[in-house]
Amino acid sequence: MSRKALIAANWKMFKTPAEAKAFVDAFLPLVAGHSRDEIALFPSPVLLPTVIEAAKGSNVVIGAQNIHFAPEGAFTGETSIGQLKAVGGTHTLIGHSERRQYFAETDEIVNKKLHAALENGIVPVVCVGEVLADREAGKTGDVLKKQIDGALVGITAEIAAPIVIAYEPVWAIGTGKTATPEMAVEAHKIIRAEVAKLLGPAVAAAVRILYGGSVKPANAKELIGQEEIDGALVGGASLKADSFAAIVKY
Ligand code: PEP
């Protein structure tokens, strides 16, 4: 089964609106007509209207780095899915390791967010990955299965089609250390097998699993070029238009 790759930029807490607009203006001509892969940008919430307006009519979709699972309410500092949709956002990251690590996001919260995204027609990119101690203790597979099991509680094959999973080994995020293609492929196979166990072989064959962790122009091809790797989630190397375009066009 051929899966269309998704190459996604996680800008984290970087860029002003002016910088974000300058990025989009420089980036769009570099990827104009590129249809082999889907391209997504995940800016901070305050940048969403600027980036969505600047990318209107292009081949680039825009999403949030995080959403709350409640439709609205007294949740200071959070962004609702309704707010994301109202400004034209179509995707969201869920359970990025920085959310899990610094904002106490649990598998249970990830699961609630996943349900909320699917119920509201937002494409969810669910992030999973082991920390270095897990890998060194030989627990990578167990950690990935637990995170996938937790994320997918109550999700059925009928509603699962939009789900994207990003495998992001935490030790490779922002560190310059990259999983070897072999390590990434092994982890992706574990994730796909777990999805097959929970949602059946058809969903597992179709689900896109991205790799994230210090992807840059120099290593994009050897990673994304693997049959098992259906795109990339890119942090640091997505902040400059030419660098992210080079990854998209690996
Ligand atoms: C990320 O933030 O999802 C990420 C993979 O970051 P980096 O590419 O900088 O490692």
Image (cartoon, helix red, strand yellow):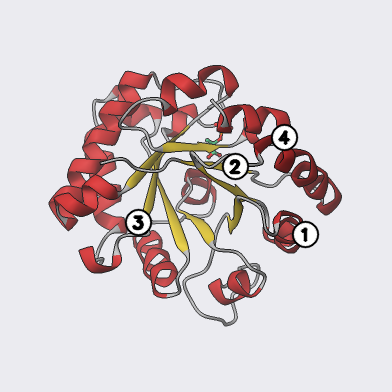
* Mark 3 residue element: helix
Q: CA distance from mark 1 to mark 4?
A: 16 Å
Residue 68 pos. (x, y %): 52, 69
Q: Are marks 3 and 2 in contact (CB under 8 Å)?
A: no
Label of residue 9 in the image: 2
Q: Which mark is residue 241?
A: 4
User: Considering the image in quadrants, where does the N terminus appear?
Assistant: top left
Q: Residue at x 68, y 54 (%)?
A: 44
- Considering only order in the chain, which callout, 1 or 2, is on the residue closer to the N terminus? 2
Asked whether residue 180 is in view, the answer is yes
- Which marked residue is nearer to the observer: mark 3 or mark 1? 1
Q: Earlier in the sequence, mark 3 or mark 4?
A: 3
The mark found on residue 107 in the picture is: 3
Discs 3/4, front = 4
Q: In front: 146, or 27?
A: 27
From what the image shows, is residue 237 above or below residue 159?
Answer: above
The residue tagged with tag 2: helix, strand or loop?
strand
- C-alpha separation, residue under disc 3 versus residue under disc 1: 32 Å
Q: How many residues crowd mark 2 within 10 Å: few (<14), some (14–19), many (20+)? A: many
- Name the residue at 53% across, 54% down: 103
